């Protein structure tokens, strides 16, 4: 799951698509996916698209 979080930080456009329901996280079950999305929502980091990894 740590690799998935790192990927979403590196590619925020993918995070946005997942959060909008237009994409899913392959290899991650529904509960883990919800935890990841809720974590980003809690940090409000998903609204920033110019982060550097």
Image (cartoon, helix red, strand yellow):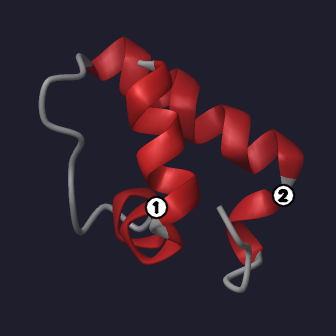
Q: Is residue 47 left or right of residue 16?
A: right
Q: Residue at x 49, y 21 (%)?
A: 2
**Mark closest to the chain's N terminus, 1 or 2:** 1
Discs 1, 2 touching: Cβ within 8 Å = no
- Which quadrant of the figure contains the N terminus? top left
Which residue is labeled 2 in the image?
Answer: 44
Establish if 26 lies above or below 32.
below
The image position of residue 33, as x and y in percent, is: 39, 28
Q: Which quadrant of the structure image shows residue 38? A: top right
Helix, strand or loop at label 2? It is loop
- Which quadrant of the figure contains the C terminus? bottom right
* Residue 15: image tag: 1
**Circle 2 residues within 10 Å: few <14, some 14–19, many ≥20:** few
Establish if 13 lies above or below 44.
below
Helix, strand or loop at label 1? It is helix
The image position of residue 34, as x and y in percent, is: 47, 28
The image position of residue 26, as x and y in percent, is: 13, 36
Q: Which quadrant of the structure image shows residue 40? A: top right
């Amino acid at each position: 799951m740590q690799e998935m979080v790192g990927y979403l930080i590196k590619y925020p456009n993918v995070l946005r698509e997942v959060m909008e329901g237009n994409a899913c996280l392959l290899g991650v079950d529904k509960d883990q996916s919800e935890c990841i999305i809720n974590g980003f929502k809690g940090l409000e980091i998903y609204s920033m698209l110019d982060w550097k990894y």
